[in-house]
Image (cartoon, rainbow, N blue to C red):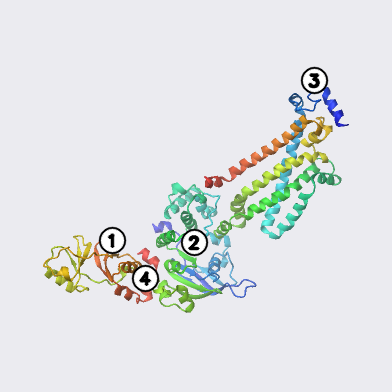
Amino acid sequence: MTGADVLAAIEIRDRTGTGCVAENGFCPDWIADNIDKYWSPLLEHVFLSVTSVAIGFAIAFTLALLAHRFRWITGPTIAVTGALYTVPSVAAFLLLLPITGRGNGTAIVALVAYTLLILFRNITTGLRNVPEEAVSAARGMGLTDGQILRQIELPLAMPEILAGLRIAFTTTVGLATLAFFAGGGGLGEQLYSERAGTGGLNFKSNVVVAGGLTVLLASFGDLIFLTIQRLATPWRRAVAS
Amino acid sequence: MPEARTPHPAVDLDFRAVTKQYPGADQPAVEELTLHVPAGEICVLVGPSGCGKTTAMRMVNRLIEPTSGDILLGGSSVKDRKPAELRREIGYAIQQIGLFPHKTIAENVATVPQLLGWPKDRVRARVDELLELVSLPPAEVRDRYPGQLSGGQRQRVGVARALAADPPVLLMDEPLGAIYAINRERLQNEFLRLQAELRKTIVFVTHDIDEAIKMGDRVAVMKRGGKLAQYASPAELLMSPADEFVEQFVGADRALKRLALQRVRDLDLWRVALVREGDPMAEVRAKIADSDIENLALLVDDQNRPLGWLGERELAAERVSGVGCSPPEPTVDTNDVLRDALGRLLSEESLYGPVIDGRGAVVGVLSMDAIAHALQTPAEDVPSSADLLAG
């Protein structure tokens, strides 16, 4: 099916008949009529992004804690996650297909791989930037290693950790539009594929809606992390004021 | 009051031939260190950088493990204790203070009591008590963050935090190192006053010999390679340095430094003829004959406060009058340390000056001779600063 055929097919359902769709313009009426087609891809998109960042965070956090205890882990981890990060995204989805098959799983594996470098680097940087004297005072007062980590290091690394989550989430929301290559659904399906029945990349109204929802999702996630960051670090504002 | 604050009595601290040898280092960081710190005293470890003073201190709470030798707290070895538990019983304050920036002042001070599982009410009461002890208004600073306090205030919080669980022993690693000179002296005095009340066993590390002499009941001078050069009272250190290294380290002005350890009230002051306006001259002559100063009388008011010196010319009249007398300055306070008193005499280019007490009344006259004489006082009779402030 060619792009022209799709547009022709859509045009049949264009009840306004003003030719907006035919002219491939920005068509509010068409959007109002077809918005329902985007809810379920949006939910899929949320699922893909949140799951991937959550799994990525769990892995990166574990690796960062190990690297915090055993310094030698840092180099190899950055090398591996860095290599993963440089694989072109479409290629990653396609490369995984023979191994994990089509579907959510493949998409999530690829998306997780992309979050690892960002999250690992931010968590380790955060832990490294904890003031040395706070840690040595804590040790000298009789806090155990675990208590130092939970009560001193992690709270003080919070700003960097949350900054990492913000970048990772925003990036993942963007990358998740490619998940449909692996059959993972999401807004990418609407955006790129004509099979979704919304006109694909050639239809401007579709691009505006699918793209707009992606941007909104990324911004909304960013706002949530920003709020958490403010709530988790009251001392920073107190000192700044 | 001290009873209420110190249910844990101070304990003796003993270094027994403690050596720390790092693998690969050509000389030990600390070599065969043997020291006895009596309960309730401040022992200052002082020396140039790399002399092992901080290493020695950190072996007490097992932040560093000795290669050989032992450290005893109240007679029992620190090796028999779990490090984390041992540390909760030893107050710890460091130069950079190390307050936790994300915790409020109250939370910072409450660190060890919380580790020990004190009930909330007791922790809160203790925090307020400690903040008051270090002269910080609890209501004002309790809920603030360290970043909102000045350097001096943070320093006090650091001390309060170290004292929180009322440890019998306190380790202080250059606790005033980051403080400007002016505030530093005030904090030193405050700390000594606090110690006079609390009477903890304290190991205090500094690289500053003046601070060591001021803060220590006993001073351990260490030199490179972690060797103990001399362990003595401040006065003894200044009067009879054990070797050339100590002599150089305490400085060419060691005699002057000693003067900071004695107060005017400790000296034999000259007696002086105190006269009032209108006194008949015969009486004045008799008083002068009975005093230690020839041909001079000191005119005072009815409260015995000094008004001026009467010399030959003024004493030639029939009765005492204030006309023509020379001003009584410099006057020195009976509580001044000799160094300050000497400074005052020198700045007025005077060989002597009236000594006044707290109410301004003359109690005698301090002379350069008396100060020179004081330098010959045997070391064991010269008190430490802590004693001076306590007395």
**Residue on which the image places disc 2:** B175
Relative side of A152 to B313, left or right: right
CA gap, disc 3 and disc 2? 82 Å
- Quadrant location of residue B391? bottom left
**Residue at the spot 64% in from the left edge and 72% down from the top edge:** B23
**Residue on which the image places disc 4:** B259
Chain letter of the residue beneath label 3 in the structure image: A
Q: Residues within 10 Å of mark 2 (few under 14, many from 20)?
A: many
- Quadrant location of residue B237? bottom left
Return the x and y of residue A77 as percentages of the image width and height.
73, 55
Nearer-N-terminus badge (2/1): 2
Q: Helix, strand, or loop for circle 1?
A: loop
**Residue on which the image places disc 1:** B358
CA gap, disc 4 and disc 2? 25 Å
Relative side of A50 to B84, left or right: right
Return the x and y of residue A31 as percentages of the image width and height.
75, 27
**Residue on which the image places disc 3:** A17
Chain letter of the residue beneath label 2 in the structure image: B
Q: Identify the amino acid type marked 3.
A: Gly
CA gap, disc 1 and disc 3? 104 Å
